[in-house]
Amino acid sequence: MTRNRRTRKKNFQGLRAATPSEDEATGPRSVLPLSGRSPKRVTPVDVPQEDLTPAEEIRPPIGAPNVVIVLVDDVGFGATSAFGGPCETPALDRVGRSGLEYTRFHTTGLRAPTRQALLTGRNHHSAGMGCTTEVAAFAPGYRGLRPNTTATVAQILRMNGYSTSFFAKCEVPECGGKGARGFERGLSSAGFDKFYGFVAAERHRRPPTLFDGVTPIEAATHPPCDVTRELTREAIHWVKAQQTLTPDKPFFMYFAPGAPLGCIAPEHWLKRYRGRFDRGWDDTREETLTRQRELGVVPSSTLLSPRPEGVRRWETLSAEEKAAAVRLVESYAAYVSYADHHVGLLLDVLDELGAAENTLVFYVTGDGDASAEGALGGMLCDDPSRVGWAHAMCTPYQWTRQVASHWGGTRRAMAVRWPSGITANGELRHQFHHVVDLVPTILDAARLPCPVLVNGVAQKPIEGIGLTYSFDDAGAAERHTSHYFEMMGNGGIYHQGWAALTKHRTPWITGVTALPRFTEERWELYDSKSDESQCEDLARRMPGKLDELKQLWLIEAAKYRVVASDDRDTERRGPESPDSDTSFEDRPTPVISPLVRVPENASGDALSEGAGQGR
């Protein structure tokens, strides 16, 4: 560490140590916003005798960490090298080696619901995002809008003295009203000081339509704007400025660039994967499972789940079909590594600033698992590969993204690092957890309570369970012992090691299809303690246990506003919400002014270079 860096770190620690404690500065933090504390003074007649001591700014409790959440898009459990997969992810390896890797971590099975649950600490139906915003409906759990009873973690941290930022894709509701109304509801009230990213899922990535706050940025097409590189550049600029100008304030950064779905890696990254997948998806799955067993991310007794119906054995494909499928998965793998490279650059900056020691980093590999929407034959537009490859990236589990019933649709690789708060390094944690558990973990680490009142509105309780109990105790008893899942009729329940589930629809089968009613669904039963990959269905052997779990799922579904097996499309979409709707947070008036910005040329800079460089 250089002398300047040592001095800056010492000054930073001194400023943090001088931060007033919770009770002294603000009193209870369960009601937000806080009022702060003004200096006690009596205004004298003689102005020069005036006490000019400024009012103390609100700060979190002493030692509250910086927080960085990294969320990549549609990367399966079996895709990354850190968890035995074929895609090189040195940044994820780096976080895991200096922290912890969670092997039984889950998301909702799809993009927008996962992001809503992640930012609020509530289940996606509780937070109004039962599915994507494009199919929002009148049902409370599916409106596509976050109710003001579920404040985001950014709101909570900001009102407690954090700087907050959002560099990511942001799905805004398309049914929320005309103009920018849905954009306001989805983002401007979410508690972020800084937003830079793109909206409406994966659209317009080549070139993207970016927003700086509510101001649209028209990205230049020559040279083409790379979304991941551009978001990383802005994130680095922001954190450097924040640490320079307000080193006594901790920061929260949400970095979720949307990669690799719908993205194309630079050519020199593509070359790294030429020929790696020529042996096909069947061999890739077997090789991945072998590495997973060796790494310990799955039990040594884990079996390889069967291929989904309709997915052919690799050797039955023609030479032309194999060539096309290989090129698609090479592109996918290259961008997984390319996105991970940019995460590594962000971690490098934290090291350079001396902020890494007290920064809690979550690296979640996928808001949804690998996308199978490229169908059985594959597509050349947005979806990365045909179903066989998507399934291979979810090794060893059944199914893929959208199938929230099975682990192949919900289980993710996740690593956590916090040098000043976690003593264990490079260890695995096998407790069951869900994306809703991140918010309570952050609040526990910062020693902040979950607020009961935000902006005068009573808040729903946080529905997640923090991970901190497991940070330094690998053998700690699992606390998140039960959790429901549901996405477009695919759903199930995890309870004390058992999993009951039902697959209602198949993602790559579209159009008019006869689907069973909820009461006619076929349910499966698995014992996760002995069958982690869900290969042996025990439903016929243990009907009593299955009925018990099905009843538990119905209870949880009613509790969290799940509408099971609603297969309507246009009929279930409501008209634009009326202006008189007051059930959501007040909406600021946006200022939309055109701004043309040419992203910096990528040639020769660290944001686009670095292929093959480890960390």
Image: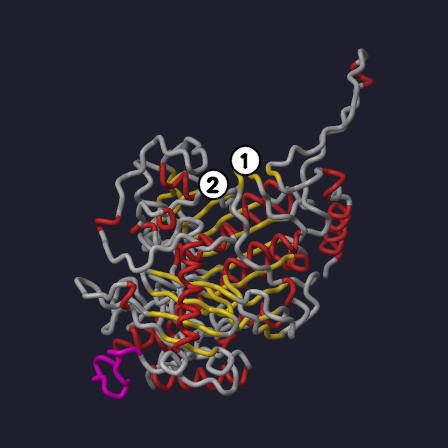
- What residue is disc 1 on? 455
- The answer to which of 354 and 603 lies nearer the viewer is 354
Say if the magenta span includes residue 302.
Answer: no
Rate crowding at label 1 as few (under 14), some (14 to 19) or many (20 or more) other CA atoms within 10 Å.
some
Amino acid tagged 1: Asn
The quadrant in which the N terminus is found is: bottom right
Q: Residue at x 79, y 19 (%)?
A: 42
Residue 442 shown left or right of residue 543 in the figure? right
- What residue is disc 2 on? 148
Residue 472 shown left or right of residue 430 in the figure? right
Query: Which secondary structure, mark 2?
Result: loop
Residues at discs 2 and 1 in contact (Cβ within 8 Å): yes
Query: Which secondary structure, mark 1?
Result: loop
Q: Which residues are magenta?
A: 308-322
Residue 454 shown left or right of residue 9 in the figure? left
Q: Most extreme residue toward the front, as rendered?
A: 544
- Residue 522: percent from left, percent from top: 30, 72
The answer to which image quadrant residue 504 occupies is: bottom left
Q: Most extreme residue toward the top, as rendered?
A: 45
